[in-house]
Image (cartoon, grey):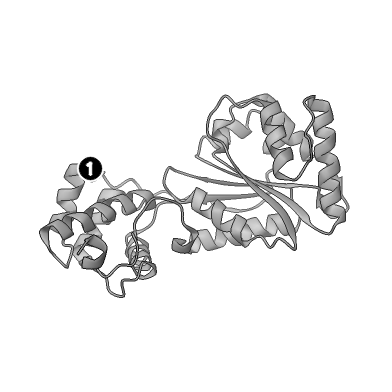
Amino acid sequence: MDCLEFYSLRQQPFSNTVETKFYYNSQQHAEAMVRLKYAIDTMKGLAVVVGDIGTGKTTLARKMIDELDETKYESALLVVIHSSITTEWLMRKIAIQIGVQNPASIKSELLGQVYERLTEVYEAGLKPVILIDEVQMLQSREIMEEFRGLLNMDVPEGKLVTFVFFGLPELDEVLSLDEPLRQRIAVKCRLKAYTEDITSDYIRHRLKVAGCDHNVFTEEAIKAIYLYSNGVPRLINTVCDNALLEGYILKKKEIDRGIIESVAVSLGLKIEPTPKVHKEPHAGIL
């Protein structure tokens, strides 16, 4: 009997691999989805999602791309993996993703191809949407200016293409490299860490999706998970995954606080002081 069988699980419930079947529709994620779809449907041009590491930005991006109906949208998801990307590389990648055949090597010609393709998509009754994850890595004023140029393409209903940017809080500084672009942000959402109650519900949700109809974590264990993870989904997954393995090794059907504390020590996690509460403006439509 392995760890999964021991806890009556069909698959790993706390893997940090992005799987939309485990998508947890928290209130903030649900609200962000509504706002982003509004920006797309009304062709606002630019929507932005920011959040700290591990708060679910990539998961939200993958969920959104899955939910954009191919009969209504021409959508693409790009993930920035390093900061040395050039404007030419990025525009070529965008061109390929939206279906440009034989992208030109000269940037001016390439931009013409992108415009023609976006126009074709629009005239076919579809709305072009490009989601880009990890945009904070694009620390180039030239790239921001290229995005602004694309957002200058208008049709009667709004912008010819809608971009949805996902990134860390530093994304605000990157967008400020081109002030006219920053002012074009129509919708902005900010993802935050979970509260203790949401952390508990999140853990139960993932266990249920994985096939377990009962919570193997005690209430005190969940409190500890929240304290050591600060409510960050990625850290919650890491702690819970290690706790299940530790519980299996100890042959304990129920995960208690002691196991969580042992795992936290192994992972080098500490309970951070509670930050001062401060009010922030709600995400909204500008």
Q: Position of residue 63 (x, y in %)?
A: 55, 58
Q: Residue furthest bottom?
A: 213
Q: In the rendered image, which quarter is residue 89 located in?
A: top right
Q: Mark 1 — residue?
A: 267
For the point 73% across and 45% down, the residue is: 98
Q: Nearer the viewer, residue 249 or 143?
A: 249
Q: In the rendered image, which quarter is residue 224 located in?
A: bottom left
Q: Is residue 261 left or right of residue 130?
A: left
Q: Nearer the viewer, residue 102 or 121?
A: 102
**Local secondary structure at mark 1:** helix
Q: Position of residue 261 (x, y in %)?
A: 16, 51
For the point 68% across and 36% down, the residue is: 93
Q: Residues within 10 Å of mark 1 (few under 14, many from 20)?
A: few
Q: Position of residue 201 (x, y in %)?
A: 36, 67
Q: Residue furthest front?
A: 1
Q: Nearer the viewer, residue 108 or 40?
A: 108
Question: Where 106 falls versus 32 (above or below)?
Answer: above
For the point 72% across and 29% down, the residue is: 145
Q: Quadrant of the N terminus?
A: bottom left
Q: Nearer the viewer, residue 50 or 4?
A: 4
Can see residue 178?
no
Q: Position of residue 23 (x, y in %)?
A: 47, 61
Question: Where 223 falls versus 17 (above or below)?
Answer: below
Q: Mark 1: which amino acid?
A: Leu
Can see residue 221?
yes
Q: Is residue 133 left or right of residue 155?
A: left
Q: Is residue 233 left or right of residue 283?
A: left
